[in-house]
């Protein structure tokens, strides 16, 4: 008997907006001018916030910070594609996602200042606190998708994670379960080419992250993660598919971490300047600006206005975050023990 091919797959790659600001009209999602401007304004706000957070960390006013520079389109394009009723499960680098869904800016700073109250789920927002243990929130998103399917809520869940996260057991368990039960969940991998100092080729021998979905029986797609239109379209399509009962999708946003892993890292010790320079030309904000300029949606005056607004919002967040005051140290008992021993009860009283 000759050998037969019993399964094969193709991985699609989606590109819409190129580095010169031109789009492929046949793939362009339907977006009003105001929606395009909003994408741009949120990305500008994210970059302003990111730089301020780095400055505050250097001044010792917040703790270790994980910057998002270069990944704005991946985060904001996908977050803006979601409905308010969808549930989002971010990991530690999703400041842009928090910002896009309207989590109060000062609370994001408060969190990076070491105060976990900054991640309390804000009123009317369906975004979970960040997951620091890599990929451990993926099964949580899958669980919410399972509940949504049972209840017929018509919502979807979305989990964000990095290329490094795809080597964790939680990633595989989550995707497997979601595939078996055809759950309404979207897996958004920001493949920023590095997991701290581990490059993509040491992370996986697979040519793409997207193809991992096929092992679990559903579609994976790679998108240009610096192209906000491609990210937005892929996320919208995946959410619609999920809500129509057609199961999960894995979206690989092919992007780059322009900054250090965190403020506790020095990326120049393990990656070349040439590599970083090559990615500078692919900047997600610059290319949307070029597109808007061609469409007559951008001017110097508009840029000045939105930069001034972004700066004012971040100034305000900084002031608010610093005026909240520290949490009650007694909280550590509340959240650590179910039942307090007599000695602990005395310790609390004597605090
Ligand atoms: C379970 C677990 N193992 C190790 C770590 C330490 N750690 C923090 S970030 C990170 C790399 C994550 O890389 P990636 O998933 O690509 O996300 P990125 O930082 O690039 O956004 C590691 C190993 C952790 N937080 N959790
Ligand atoms: Mg990474």
Image: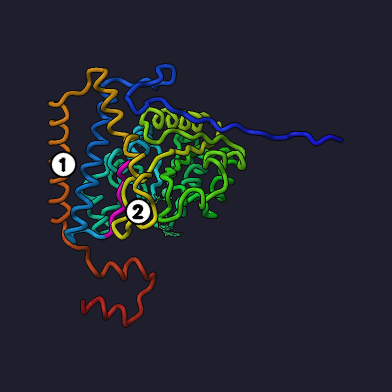
Give the left or right position of residue 125, taking residue 328 as reference.
right
- The answer to whether 111 is drawn above or below residue 70 in the figure is below
For disc 2, the neighbor class at 10 Å (few under 14, some 14 to 19, many from 20) is some
Residue 27 shows up from this direction = yes
Q: Is residue 68 magenta?
A: yes
Q: Disc number at residue 261?
A: 2
Mark 2 residue CB less than 8 A from any atom of ligand 1: yes
Q: Nearer the viewer, residue 348 or 36?
A: 36
Secondary structure mainly formed by the magenta segment: loop
The response on whether ligand 1 sits within 8 Å of label 1 is: no
- Location of residue 350 (image quadrant): bottom left
Quick one: 120 or 20, which is closer to the camera?
Answer: 20
Q: Position of residue 340 (x, y in %)?
A: 35, 75
According to the picture, the residue beneath numbered tag 1 turns out to be: 313
> Which stretch did the figure color magenta?
64-70
Residues 129 and 271: in front is: 271
Image quadrant where residue 155 sits: top left
- Answer yes or no: is residue 180 visible: no
N-terminal-most mark, 2 or 1: 2
Relative placement, left or right, of 205 versus 155 is right
Q: Residue 114 location, x and y as percent?
A: 26, 60
Residue at 27%, 32% (x, y): give it: 286
State the CA–CA distance, disc 2 to disc 1: 25 Å
x, y percent for residue 290: 27, 25
Type of colouring: rainbow
Residue reaching furthest right?
Answer: 1
Q: Nearer the viewer, mark 2 or mark 1?
A: 2
Q: Is residue 242 left or right of residue 58?
A: right
Q: Please check the rendered image and state whether residue 231 is part of the magenta-colored stretch, yes or no.
A: no
Could you tell me which residue is drawn at 19 percent across and 53 percent down? 55
The residue at 36%/79% (across/down) is 341
Q: Quadrant of the C terminus?
A: bottom left
């Amino acid at each position: 008997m000759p050998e037969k091919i019993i399964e094969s797959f193709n991985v699609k790659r989606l590109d819409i907006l190129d580095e010169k600001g031109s789009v492929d009209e046949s793939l362009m999602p339907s977006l009003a001018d105001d929606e395009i401007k909003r994408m741009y304004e949120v990305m500008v706000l994210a970059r302003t916030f990111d730089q301020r957070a780095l400055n505050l960390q250097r001044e010792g006013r917040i703790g270790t910070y994980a910057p998002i520079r270069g990944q704005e389109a991946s985060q904001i394009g996908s977050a803006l594609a979601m409905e308010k009723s969808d549930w989002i499960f971010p990991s530690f680098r999703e400041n842009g996602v928090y910002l896009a869904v309207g989590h109060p800016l000062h609370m994001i700073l408060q969190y990076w200042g070491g105060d976990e109250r900054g991640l309390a789920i804000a009123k009317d927002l369906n975004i979970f606190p960040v997951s620091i243990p890599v990929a451990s929130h993926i099964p949580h998103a899958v669980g919410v998708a399972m509940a949504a399917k049972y209840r017929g809520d018509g919502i979807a869940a979305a989990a964000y994670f990095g290329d490094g996260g795809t080597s964790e057991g939680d990633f595989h368990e989550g995707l497997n379960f979601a595939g078996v039960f055809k759950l309404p969940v979207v897996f958004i991998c920001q493949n920023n080419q590095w997991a701290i100092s581990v490059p993509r080729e040491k992370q996986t021998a697979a040519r793409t992250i997207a193809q991992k979905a096929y092992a679990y029986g559903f579609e994976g797609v790679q998108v240009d993660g610096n192209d906000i239109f491609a990210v937005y379209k892929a996320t919208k399509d995946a959410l619609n598919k999920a809500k129509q009962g057609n199961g999960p999708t894995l979206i690989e946003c092919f992007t780059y971490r322009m900054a250090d892993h965190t403020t506790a890292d020095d990326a120049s010790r393990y990656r070349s300047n040439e590599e970083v320079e090559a990615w500078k030309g692919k900047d997600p904000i610059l290319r949307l600006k070029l597109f808007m300029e061609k469409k007559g949606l951008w001017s110097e005056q508009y840029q000045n206005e939105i930069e001034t607004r972004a700066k004012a919002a971040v100034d305000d967040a900084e002031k608010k975050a610093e005026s909240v005051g520290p949490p009650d140290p007694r909280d550590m008992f509340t959240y650590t023990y179910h039942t307090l021993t007599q000695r602990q009860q005395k310790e609390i009283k004597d605090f």
